[in-house]
Amino acid sequence: MERTVPKIASEEIELYLRTLYSLLRSTTEIQIRTLEEVHAGMNSLLHPLARQLDPDTSAFVYSLLRLPDCMPDVKVVALGQSTSVFENHGYANVENWIPVNTRARRRRCFYDGKEKLACFIASRSDIEDVIPAMTAYQIEWNKLHVFLNQVPSSFDFKSVLKNPTQFSSLAEFLHLSEEDMRRFEVIWGDDFLGYLERIKNKKCDFRVNLLAGSLSEYWRATRAWWANIELSNTLITKRPVYFISSNTHSIPNLLTGFALKKEELLINFLKNTDEKNLYNELKIIKNKQEEASLENLLYYVLKKAQQTPEFDYLRKDQSDYEIKNGITRILSQHYFDVDAQIIEINKINFNEVDPRLKNGSDYYLLKNSDAIILNIDYPLGLAAYNILTKIAEHSSPILGVYILGKAATLNGVLGDVMIPNVVYDEHSQNTYMFCNAFSANDIVDDLIFGTVLDNQKAVTVLGTFLQNGKLAEVFYREGYSDIEMEAGPYLSAIFEMYRPTRHPVNEIVNLYNINFDLGVIHYASDTPLSKGKNLGAGALSYFGMDSTYAASLAILRRIFKVEVNRLTSK
């Protein structure tokens, strides 16, 4: 059958990857500036102004959100798969360093308080995510460094936030729009002027050191990740399994209804915060001025409350309540950041679950279930293949695989839900065709702010920066409008779960005959063909809850339906 997608992404991206990995073969630190030219040459959709003198605000913001806040003080970034890898290369006790997080990417990172950052990686995809982000960060930092040092010495920086005229003048000096300056102000908050001062006083010059790049190290890290789960709950190897790759909040929230029990407390919390938009949303829902879900709002507010010292105790209360209802949380330690949850179906209390899950007349049969749900925080790229392969090796039978993740859309808007039945995978260069367990009808009734697009064609890309306009044009022309990072590796693992060989390369692969349930749902978090409309320009925030919970409800209903049928057939 003739292929409809080119085998290679583009010559520019191929050149970038060849350059990157040839440099990473070095046993010493490499300088990020050696990658700046090939990075700019990619013409990345996320960094279209890389070559221009004017700043690319969206690219800088995108990178800021995916790297820790300590980056202005970092000179060296070390990448490794495990604590033993770091120790073997002279980075002793990195987990005793200061833990630092990023706002829009889950990755375990530790800062030594001086100039070194240690980041745990799960697969090659992490390299192809971190290093382009660092390169974009450095390019855009240094552009602003030049412009800040051209600002007249008489300019009063301290009055910028108090005087609109001064704010406008500074934006002009930096070749930024006022809107773009406001975006930096939102991200940097009270440290806005401090950040500008650091950018002015110091040129960015990152170095990176890949401590171990062998495939066996990734496998070793994945094996240790799985061993931690087995040790925490031995049921995982003894019971039938429904596997979900999603997040660690929507599934347990729906199954326990914990936030709904705290409604009065959470509403009072909301009244006493600065979250005016959320409080207005609450009043609109209460007054039935729109059909938005009160449950979704309470789940969102619960997370906000748990992040405050006053209501931090709700974390433990929620954990205790989940354990009582058959949900065990397993934190990832010493390796990559993919937490897991084991859920015993027969312990779910259907009197307490989210009201939208209470309409199953035969759910009482689930009290006789011996199956469990394994829910993991979705991994990045190729780590999905490593993880599902390891789970399949140790769990049997697997009754269903359900994948929920973020994606960019070429024909929708933020918050839309996409359901593919064809996936082209840039890693294996395979085109996978499969019967998706979900259709628009499974989601549309629970989705208020978006549209459900089923029968879509998805592309699993190597990395967010590793896409350019030419490639997007080809994808769009051939009908591939759903761009994401995990489905392809998951489907490669699924092929190996029912066939006696390793997944093929550069083939059209039929997965219609697999002997377990398979569902893939994506929700739009980026619109890369619209300038600035990506996660660097904004975030789904509260309204992203709508698509996340609509999809999560569909997955849980599907699992309950399949399990009831299995129990009935027994």
Image (cartoon, rainbow, N blue to C red):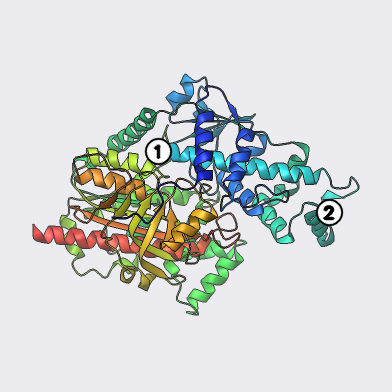
**Residue closest to the far front:** 2
Q: Say few, some or many: other residues with alpha carbon within 10 Å of mark 2 (under 14 / 14 to 19 / 20 or more).
A: few
Instruction: Tell me which amino acid carries mark 1.
Output: Ser
| 298 vs 568, nearest the viewer | 568
Along the viewing direction, whichever of 293 and 489 lies nearer the viewer: 489
Please report whichever mark, 2 or 1, sits nearer to the chain's N-terminal start. 2
Determine whether, in the image, residue 463 is placed left or right of residue 560. right
Label 1's element?
loop
Picture coordinates of residue 486, whole percent (x, y): 39, 49
Q: Amino acid at mark 2?
A: Ser
In the structure shown, which secondary structural element does the residue marked by tag 2 occupy? helix
What is the x, y in percent for residue 342? Answer: 30, 47
Identify the image quadrant of residue 3: bottom left
Residue assigned mark 1: 332
Q: Quadrant of residue 202?
A: top right
| Distance in Å between CA atoms under marks 2 and 1 | 46 Å
- Name the residue located 72 percent from the left edge and 56 percent from the top edge: 181
Q: Toward which corner of the image does residue 185 lie, by quadrant?
A: bottom right
Instruction: Check the image and report above or below for 175 versus 239.
Output: below
